Image (cartoon, rainbow, N blue to C red):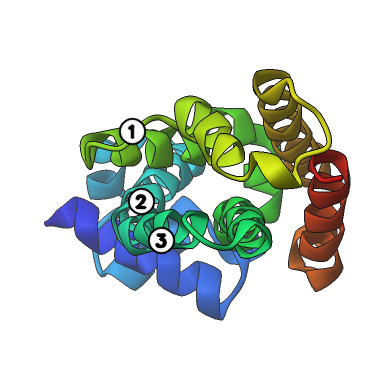
Amino acid sequence: MLVKAIQEASLRILEQEGPDQLTTQRIADVAGINIASLYQYFPNKEAVLADLFEEQIRQYTASGRERIMHINRLAQTDFAATLRAIVDMEVDQHLMLQQMDPAFYQGYQNSFDVHQRINELTISLNNPSWEEWFPRFLSQHRDKLRGQDINTQARMARHVLSGTLLSAVKDEPGLLMEGELKQELFTLLFCYLCK
């Protein structure tokens, strides 16, 4: 219950006052607890943020179930719409965390593998992993593809998508908020994969 109060207070501070105002003392004040109580659970602000990010990832992953089902439905009939939905989901995963505390996420992004969590959720729903699903998806739309080596195309497309997003978070985090990034990523992948 105390941890939940600390999480809620931290979110409130991040949303209403911004990440620069997030200190352990401010968290304790907003949560209505003694700072010593906060330190029983978290040694510093970074530990509070890490816990908060983990909670946000859990919530995003739980809500990701509908997106995964939507993408699976699209994959049966519409190649371009499926690819666009994949790009949207991948960008949104990073944006959700980056908006909470950009500097913290930029420094610790490798510790928060949202994509892996979504992959685990997908597998738990008796679906194939992303690495297995994407080549199958491409195979279903073989007539649209420019090459015959689907596994290589799938691998390259996955690496381009994840590498571009990780680079954007590290070097130009503001790109995540621009709709142009989603459009350019979609165009890049679509042009690479299709005839």
Q: Residue at x 52, y 75 (%)?
A: 15
The type of residue carrying mark 3 is Arg
Q: Is residue 82 left or right of residue 143?
A: left
Comparing 144 with 106, the one in front is 144
Regarding residue 41, the answer to whether it shows in the image is yes
The residue labelled by disc 3 is: 73
Outermost residue toward the left? 1
Q: Position of residue 160 (x, y in %)?
A: 78, 34
Of badges 3 and 1, nearer the viewer stands 3
Q: Position of residue 190 (x, y in %)?
A: 80, 50
What's the CA distance linking mark 1 and mark 2?
9 Å
- Asked whether disc 1 touches disc 2, contact meaning CB atoms under 8 Å apart, the reply is yes
Residue located 79% across and 71% down the image:
179
Which residue type carries mark 2?
Thr
Q: Position of residue 43 (x, y in %)?
A: 38, 33
Would residue 121 be found to the left or right of residue 150 on screen?
Answer: left
At label 1, the amino acid type is Glu
Q: Secondary structure at mark 1?
A: helix
